[in-house]
Amino acid sequence: MEVTLSQYEGPLPEPEEIANVLNDEYYKKDYHGAIRSTLYTLITVSAIALLIATLLLPVVRIYGGSMQPTISDDSIILCRKSGLPDRGDVLAFYYNNKILVRRVIGLPGDEISVDPNGRVTVNGETLKEEYVKNQGTIKSGLIYPYVVPDGRYFVLADNRVDTLDSRSDLFGCIQEEDFIGQVVFCVWPMDELGLIR
């Protein structure tokens, strides 16, 4: 049934009232559109950040003091996935379903020696290790000089007291397929924000 103005009983709304109702409807439409747009943007940015974190710059949280003073306990660090590490690089890797961080000391084919005082020699040259907090020794099981096997890397902690690393024959050298990436940047805590060397 069609209603004409002549059949409509009651006062007609003022033009200002109609304009206000229309403005409210437009506002609701704009508001919902802005929320939808914001959600899509957040989801897209999160997906891109997740891809970058997974493929290019993995994020790792540090537990324990094995890399002090270079990296503190409870730090959050960024790793760079790029090629093979060099001697002196700090490396994140998988070990027994855990993520560990150690410094690369020996490359494949290098001859490593560690004396009873903890001093490290690579290919006959004693390393100057300013980054080492404690030079401690551990029960090794390795016979020195030790030659690093092909495709493996000899890694040591910066805090070498009671720390598991390649000095132990149980731990051994790290395989390339276990690498997460080279540790390059500390993002937390804020007072340690910066490059890691």
Image (cartoon, rainbow, N blue to C red):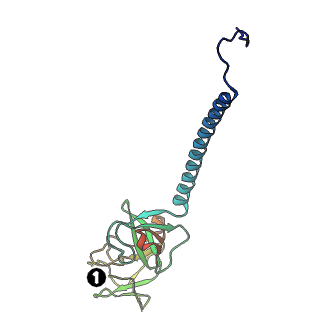
Where is residue 107? Give x, y as percent: 47, 79
Left or right position of 153 against 45: left
- Quadrant in which residue 3 is drawn: top right
> Residue at horizontal 67%, vertical 19%?
12
Q: Position of residue 84 (x, y in %)?
A: 53, 73
Image quadrant in which you'd find residue 32? top right
**In the rendered view of the protein, which quadrant contains the N terminus?**
top right
Q: Is residue 77 left or right of residue 161?
A: right
Q: In which quarter of the image is residue 137?
A: bottom left
Residue at the disc numbered 1: 136
**Badge 1 local density, few (<14 within 10 Å), some, or many (20+)?**
some
Q: Between residue 93 and residue 51, name the one nearer to us.
A: 51
Residue closer to the observer: 50 or 111:
50
x and y percentages locating residue 62 in the rendered image: 38, 66
> Is residue 130 placed above or below 148 in the rendered structure?
below
Residue 3 higher or lower than 72, as above or below: above
Q: Where is residue 24 in the image (x, y as percent from the top left)?
A: 62, 34
What is the number of callouts on the image? Answer: 1
Q: Is mark 1 on a helix, strand or loop?
A: loop
Kind of residue indicated by mark 1: Gly
Instruction: Identify the residue at horizontal 66%, vertical 11% (top origin).
Output: 9
